[in-house]
């Protein structure tokens, strides 16, 4: 698996492109808000000769879905996410207003497929297992590849931190339990690619994360 990280939008969100040796690819958490960000993502996909197969979302907070409509319009791929987070799509205009963003800057794209706990996601020779890690949002997911030793944790777990739980249907106790039961059960050497900030490892967060 090759992983390319983009940092997009005013929230400094990590958008990931993952692809195999044959160029089959997925975008995880398309956060490209501005036109130059959209074109940067598109240019990379084209320059690498990638065949975009899926658009995956760890959760549906606005900073992680800004680019979903662009990818749908460009590649005909609807995003995949948990049903439990779907209400955030209806709340998108209000979320934009709450964070001081003009409503015309973006539009939510409807989910094409629902993802569920323990489901396998295949992108060419890449296989992810879906892990349910609610708490930051009710439908928060992580995507784990045992073969490649990586997990995309969304906003559940960060380097030395955890996701906020003060947004709608967030819950601190639920998040801590999900991290301990789902993420901390992974091998210590598993590399964690978070929704914001640098990568870390499961082992490092077990030892040093002050919230855990």
Image (cartoon, grey):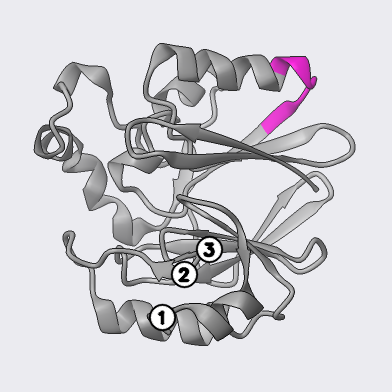
The nearer-to-camera label among 1 and 3 is 1
Observer-nearest of 121 and 187: 187
Q: Mark 3 = which residue? A: 142
Observer-nearest of 90 and 43: 43
Residue 112 seen in this snapshot: no
Identify the residue at image location x=43%, y=84%. 212
Q: Earlier in the sequence, mark 3 or mark 2?
A: 3
Q: Mark 2 = which residue? A: 160
Q: Which residues are magenta?
A: 46-52
Q: Earlier in the sequence, mark 1 or mark 3?
A: 3
Q: Mark 1 = which residue? A: 210
Based on the displayed image, in which of its 4 quarters is residue 10 positioned?
Answer: top left
Residues at badges 2 and 1 in contact (C-beta under 8 Å)? yes
Query: Picture coordinates of residue 34 (x, y %)?
Result: 38, 18
Based on the displayed image, in which of its 4 quarters is residue 53 positioned?
Answer: top right
Spatial CA distance of label 3 from label 2 is 18 Å
Q: How many marks?
A: 3
Identify the residue at image location x=61%, y=76%. 204
Mark 1, secondary structure of its residue? loop
Mark 3, secondary structure of its residue? strand
């Amino acid at each position: 698996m090759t992983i390319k990280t983009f940092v997009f939008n005013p929230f400094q969100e990590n958008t990931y492109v993952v692809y195999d040796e044959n160029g089959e690819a997925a975008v995880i958490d398309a956060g490209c808000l501005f036109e130059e960000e959209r074109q940067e993502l598109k240019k990379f996909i084209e320059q690498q000769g990638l065949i975009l197969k899926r658009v995956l979302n760890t959760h549906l907070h606005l900073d992680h879905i800004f680019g979903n409509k662009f990818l749908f319009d460009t590649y005909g791929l609807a995003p995949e996410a948990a049903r439990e987070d779907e209400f955030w799509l209806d709340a998108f205009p209000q979320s934009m207003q709450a964070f001081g963003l003009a409503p015309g800057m973006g539009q939510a794209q409807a989910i094409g497929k629902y993802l569920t706990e323990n489901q396998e996601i295949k992108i060419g020779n890449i296989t992810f297992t879906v892990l349910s890690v609610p708490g930051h949002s009710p439908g928060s997911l992580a995507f784990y590849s045992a073969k490649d030793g990586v997990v995309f944790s969304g906003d559940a777990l960060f380097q030395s931190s955890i996701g906020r739980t003060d947004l709608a249907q967030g819950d601190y106790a639920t998040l801590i339990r999900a991290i301990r039961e789902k993420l901390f059960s992974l091998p210590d050497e598993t590399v964690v690619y978070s929704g914001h900030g640098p990568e870390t490892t499961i082992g490092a967060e077990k030892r040093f994360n002050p919230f855990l």
